[in-house]
Image: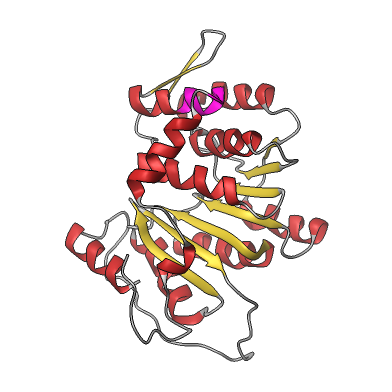
Amino acid sequence: MQMRKQQSASEPDPDRLGLPPEDELVAAVKALAPKEEAIALTLDALETGIFRHPDGRTDDLQTVRLQPGEVGLLAHLARVCPKPLSIEIGFGMGSSASVILGTRRLERKPFAHLIFDPFGLSNNRGKIVQAYLQARFPKAFRRIMKRSEIGLGALIEKVGRGAAGLIFIDGGHRFENAMTDFVLSDLLCCQGGYIVYDDALYPAIETVINYVIANRPDYAVAHLAVANTTILKKIGPDKRAWDAFKPFEVPQREDWTPRQPAAAAAARKRS
């Protein structure tokens, strides 16, 4: 991430996010493992591919694994989360939930973590991790079996705008799903809070990020700050006119086609 001179308010500036380097993020989350069982079990699972419940049961992660930098990032953002409420869209194998819950527990402040995901993985994968989290965090952890498009809207009516400090989006990967998740997460995210997108190398997600960079000066953006991940920090109120719109880049790639390494490096420099 590079500091740029003469940056306009509408352009993203990753340095405003105050993110440590990726190696420091990874080292920091590893240092939490001896202090919190959920983090220790998750780091072991991401390394070996198997989540081992303390009672002896196992859950096979297969290809559903977070990168070390993303794990470190989520732990960092969970630690600095400015509100008691954090949210996830998509449960997967529960690795991100485990890290967020474990980190927030170590902060020794009241918190709640809600996950919207009515779907599941094949062969009931993830169920053992979920059972562990329900037992480990009985008051803080809740998986809501509703699509995010429905559940987030209902949550806004219940808790009001600006109630969440961290929202991690790894749900539907079609453009309309990812964009709807942003629109609703934006209403829930407080000033100073974070919206994080997984799979930001892929065209549907990248298109949403490009929209935010071009059209939302109330967000600072660290695009691909760690592998495959983009962070949006709400830095002010939305003061746009009712008809505001700026054109934005749409990747000319189809389906699950990632941005190539050279292009990804260029995107990081632009942000």
Q: Is residue 53 left or right of residue 155?
A: left
Q: Is residue 39 magenta?
A: yes
Q: Position of residue 30 (x, y in %)?
A: 42, 32
- Residue positioned 57% across, 8% down in the render: 55
* Chain part drawn in magenta: 35-42
Q: Is residue 245 left or right of residue 187?
A: left
Could one spot residue 261 in this view of the protein?
Answer: yes
Please name the predominant secondary structure of the magenta segment in the image: helix
| 43 versus 52 height, above or below | below
| Depth check, front residue: 196 or 128 | 196
Could one spot residue 67 in this view of the protein?
Answer: no
- Residue positioned 48% across, 22% down in the render: 41
Q: Position of residue 157 (x, y in %)?
A: 80, 61
Quarter residue 238 falls in: bottom right
Q: Position of residue 125 (x, y in %)?
A: 49, 26
Of all residues, the one furthest to the right in this rendering is 158
| Depth check, front residue: 180 or 13 | 13
